[in-house]
Image (cartoon, rainbow, N blue to C red):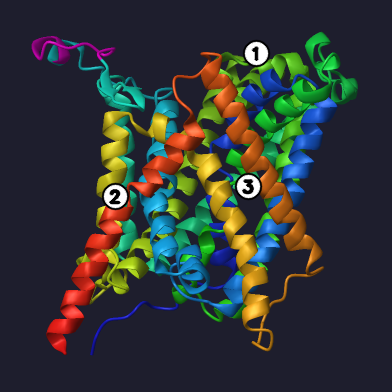
């Protein structure tokens, strides 16, 4: 008897994965850059509300696809079914090269960064001198830019240890990973709400509700295309913080009653983190004002807020929360994304051993190991900074295609049973498609303008698409290999 994936996840664990995949490092750092891009508190709150609504529209749209195709692999399976296996493969490739592995590397690095509040990490300066390099010696990548693999090696080793630990833990069982997810997500939510409560109750001597309506002089003069550009830039930060809501669909094959459980988990989780994000941003602005958020040291907005309220004594509390949050999100990302490569390998479109299921633990252990290995490469070379700068644009191209897929399937299979139908069809998915297409176009134009102005070294959006298209030779290789194997059997 061949081992198979085990349906071990219930509603609570599945909802925890949705929340844990989203509420990571972004909400604690993105507001600072967003406030510099759009220095107006009411407009910033509008950005968080608008991006939250659009995220909900996208989540509702994906729920229809998940109910219709509750298979392990998520968007890879949807794209393969609707657009053909070539585009399905490119989605999975983008997930490996940019989205999933890049997120694992970036968030685990965030964990290690905050661990320095408790332990002093080595920089290996003497070892680097013996090798004839320094921390700031770059590796130059043609057409992409420079990476700095020798910087903060101590942090990278701690982050690598976290990736290895969570990879091994998730190999040992999806139920174990799901249980850890439930515990860590619950603890994280309680801790965030407690800090917000401290801000509003203990910070009344420094905070003001008037801050919610305040804009800087620069913010007050924004108009026309400059306002549109600033709004879109701020939205990029919010979308980075909101991203990950669809990851739970990757593990549909390991969820009990997935056609009911996953839509309920996605909707419940999405509404939860939208409300949480707006409350957290209200707390930031209440205590710090838009200027204080924009000028938070190293973009550590939450740390600056608590420091303003309770002094230096709160630094350790915030650092512990940051580490818990990063741990939780890294675990959910490790758990979910490996299932995409498992599904691809199962179809003969990836490294074939990745389709293997562990005989004892019933997990896609080779896919988890491949994902872990590539995440470590991105982490140790420092290339995840470059990769994640392309992340939001590529993801929104894929989200756009996901929403369009609902219309394609409705036309192609009008009588097909749909356990979950997106409410407000066709308006909700149509609004999402129009927005996603507009957002992608504006981002592309903004990137080109920034490149021409010399404010960024490459056109990030185009470079991200090129990295995705680099997967085509691998697709043709694996497809040809599969074809030869089928012919040999015949």
Q: Neighbour class for label 3 at 10 Å: few (<14), some, many (≥20)?
A: some
Residue 311 versus residue 81 in the image, above or below: above
At a point 60% along the width and 67% down the height, the residue shown is 405
* Residue carrying label 1: 295
Magenta part, dominant SS = loop
In percent of width and height, residue 74 lies at 49, 66
Quote the CA–CA distance across marks 2 and 3. 27 Å
Q: Which of disc 2 and disc 1 is earlier in sequence?
A: 1
Q: Which of disc 3 and disc 1 is earlier in sequence?
A: 3
At a point 81% along the width and 36% down the height, the residue shown is 46
Residue 68 placement, left or right of 147 = right
Task: Name which quarter of the figure residue 338 lies in.
Answer: bottom left
Residue 453 falls within the magenta-colored stretch: no
Quote the CA–CA distance across marks 1 and 3. 26 Å
Q: Nearer the viewer, residue 88 or 17?
A: 88
**Residue stretch in magenta:** 128-137
Q: Residue 372 carries which label?
A: 2
Residue 77 placement, left or right of 274 = left
| Quadrant of the rendering where the N terminus is positioned | bottom left
Name the outermost residue toward the left: 130
Quote the CA–CA distance across marks 1 and 2. 35 Å
In percent of width and height, residue 254 lies at 44, 74
Q: Which mark is residue 43?
A: none
Q: Which of disc 3 and disc 2 is earlier in sequence?
A: 3
Work out whether residue 229 can be spotted: yes
Q: Residue 189 carries which label?
A: 3
Looking at the rendered structure, the secondary structure element under dot 3 is: helix
At a point 49% along the width and 19% down the height, the residue shown is 456
Q: Which of marks 2 and 3 is in front?
A: 2
């Amino acid at each position: 008897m061949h081992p198979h994936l085990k349906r071990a996840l219930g509603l609570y664990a599945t909802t925890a994965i949705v929340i844990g995949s989203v509420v990571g490092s972004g909400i604690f750092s993105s507001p600072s850059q967003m406030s510099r891009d759009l220095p107006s508190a009411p407009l910033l709150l509008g950005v968080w509300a608008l991006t939250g609504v659009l995220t909900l529209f996208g989540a509702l749209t994906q729920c229809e696809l998940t109910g219709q195709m509750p298979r392990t692999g998520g968007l890879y399976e949807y794209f393969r079914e609707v657009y053909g296996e070539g585009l399905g493969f490119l989605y999975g490739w983008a997930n490996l090269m940019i989205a999933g592995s890049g997120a694992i590397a970036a968030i685990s690095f965030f964990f290690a960064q905050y661990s320095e509040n408790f332990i002093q990490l080595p920089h290996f300066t003497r070892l680097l001198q013996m090798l004839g390099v320094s921390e700031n010696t770059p590796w130059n990548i043609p057409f992409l830019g420079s990476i700095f693999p020798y910087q903060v090696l101590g942090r990278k080793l701690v982050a690598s240890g976290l990736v290895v630990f969570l990879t091994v833990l998730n190999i040992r069982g999806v139920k174990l990973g799901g249980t850890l997810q439930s515990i860590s997500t619950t603890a994280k939510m309680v801790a965030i709400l407690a800090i917000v409560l401290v801000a509003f109750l203990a910070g009344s001597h420094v905070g003001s509700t008037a801050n919610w309506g305040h804009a800087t002089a620069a913010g007050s003069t924004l108009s026309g295309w400059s306002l549109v550009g600033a709004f879109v830039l701020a939205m990029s930060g919010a979308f980075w913080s909101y991203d990950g809501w669809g990851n739970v669909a990757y593990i549909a094959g390991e969820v009990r009653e997935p056609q009911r459980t996953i839509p309920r988990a996605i909707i419940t989780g999405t509404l939860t983190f939208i409300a949480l994000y707006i409350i957290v941003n209200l707390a930031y602005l209440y205590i710090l004002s838009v200027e204080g958020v924009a000028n938070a040291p190293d973009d550590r907005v939450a740390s600056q807020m608590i420091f303003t309220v309770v002094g230096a004594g709160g630094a350790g509390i915030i650092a512990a929360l940051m580490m818990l949050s990063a741990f939780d999100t890294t675990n959910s990302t490790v758990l979910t994304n490996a299932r995409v490569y498992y599904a691809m390998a199962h179809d003969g479109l990836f490294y074939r051993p990745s389709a293997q299921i562990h005989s004892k633990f019933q997990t896609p252990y080779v896919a988890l190991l491949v994902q872990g290995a590539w995440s470590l490469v991105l982490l140790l070379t420092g290339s995840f900074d470059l990769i994640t700068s392309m992340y939001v644009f590529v993801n929104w191209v894929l989200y756009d295609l996901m929403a369009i897929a609902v219309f394609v399937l409705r036309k192609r299979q009008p009588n097909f049973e749909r356990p979950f139908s997106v409410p407000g069809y066709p308006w909700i998915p149509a609004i999402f498609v129009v927005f996603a297409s507009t957002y992608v176009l504006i981002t592309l134009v903004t990137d080109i303008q920034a490149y021409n102005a010399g404010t960024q070294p490459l056109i990030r959006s185009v470079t991200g698409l090129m990295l995705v298209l680099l997967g085509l030779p691998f697709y043709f290789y694996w497809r040809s290999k599969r074809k030869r194997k089928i012919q040999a059997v015949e």
